[in-house]
Amino acid sequence: MEKPLVSIEGLTKTFPSSGKADDLVVFEDVNISIQRGEFICIIGHSGCGKSTILNILAGLDEASSGGVIMDGKEVSGPSLERGVVFQNYSLMPWLSALQNVNFGVRARWPEWSKEQVQAHSIKYLNMVGLSDSIERKPSQLSGGMRQRVSIARAFATQPKLLLLDEPFGALDALTRGVIQEELIKIWSESKQTVFMITHDVDEAILLADRILLMTNGPYARVAESVSINLPRPRSRAEIIQHPGYYKIRNHLVNFLVNRSAQLAGKQTERNSQPLTVDPLVDTEQTSELHTINEAEASSQPAA
Ligand SMILES: Nc1ncnc2c1ncn2[C@@H]1O[C@H](COP(=O)(O)OP(=O)(O)OP(=O)(O)O)[C@@H](O)[C@H]1O
């Protein structure tokens, strides 16, 4: 297999307590490999540490132990090689949509002429359906449009790794659906590597090549890597007709409703990678994994 773009190795995060309580070990010994061009979603209950992992990947937070290697170099601070889109848009309010994207593009390619920067930014704003609104300031745009600008800006700067922290969390279901499909389009044209947090199982199945499932915190870990082998290009209307769709969905929901809590706080071997599961290929193998997980959950002492 090709060398991964990103290797997350033995990642552990502890927050010191403010009083007499024990320190908070949010997650422990998280190991993840991300291949170039992959679209990865990570799902887990609130508080298991998804945003903390994303912030460490972005270089905005530090691990307590373990680390992240990207393209052979340790991640040790923010860099233009990693772009981040947060839920709350993070646009500069005094700049137009186009100027916001230009800003990122100019920082990435300072040697480009004004015309080159502008043409590149417009191309990405067009991809997210904003060609008629490029001169508007964020206050003149809807929430969905603002998030489109953030996505256009992040993709336009072509970072090696794009980190999306629940980018659609604040949007209504209809807008969310439209932008998910725009995200698929922009991703399939750009072939970027994406690591995205979501709480929405259907969104993750629509977008991801693999979904990482986290157990509940504290002492959370990434227990499974679920392959989403549904044909691409995908659309929301067609994907639910696929005979495998509900197998995948049921597997994910079962994990979130039952096993994420059963497995919480259970130790595994050090440096172990998440179990690889393909709910479509071998249901016997998958149910065997469930049995192993359930046996693990009932037999091992809590950490
Ligand atoms: N700076 C901090 N100091 C102390 N505790 C923190 C800090 N940042 C996060 N935490 C705690 O770490 C845990 C994980 O937080 P994080 O935001 O990474 O979880 P999450 O899985 O992204 O949650 P959600 O899905 O609700 O966004 C939570 O219990 C949170 O309270």
Image (cartoon, helix red, strand yellow):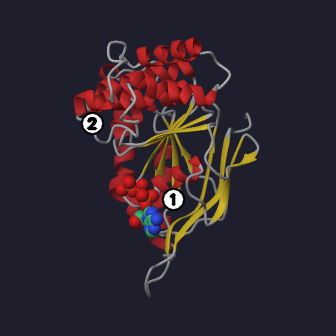
**Percent position of residue 151, x then y:** 44, 29
301 in relation to 224, above or below: below
- Residues under labels 2 and 1: Cα distance? 38 Å
Would you say residue 16 is visible in this rendering? yes
Residue 256, image x, y percentages: 36, 53
Where disc 2 sits, the SS reads: loop
Depth check, front residue: 288 or 156: 156
Point out the tag, 2 or 1, that comes first from the N-terminus: 2
Does the image show residue 152? no
Q: Which residue is mark 1?
A: 292
The x, y position of residue 233, in whole percent, is: 45, 18
Q: Position of residue 131 (x, y in %)?
A: 37, 13
Q: Nearer the viewer, residue 159 or 301?
A: 159
Q: Residue at x 39, y 43 (%)?
A: 198
Q: Which residue is mark 2?
A: 171
Q: Callout 1: helix, strand or loop? A: helix
- The residue positioned 45% from the left and 28% from the top of the image is 100
Can you tell which quarter of the image residue 252 is in? top left
Mark 1 crowdedness (10 Å alpha carbons): few <14, some 14-19, many ≥20: few
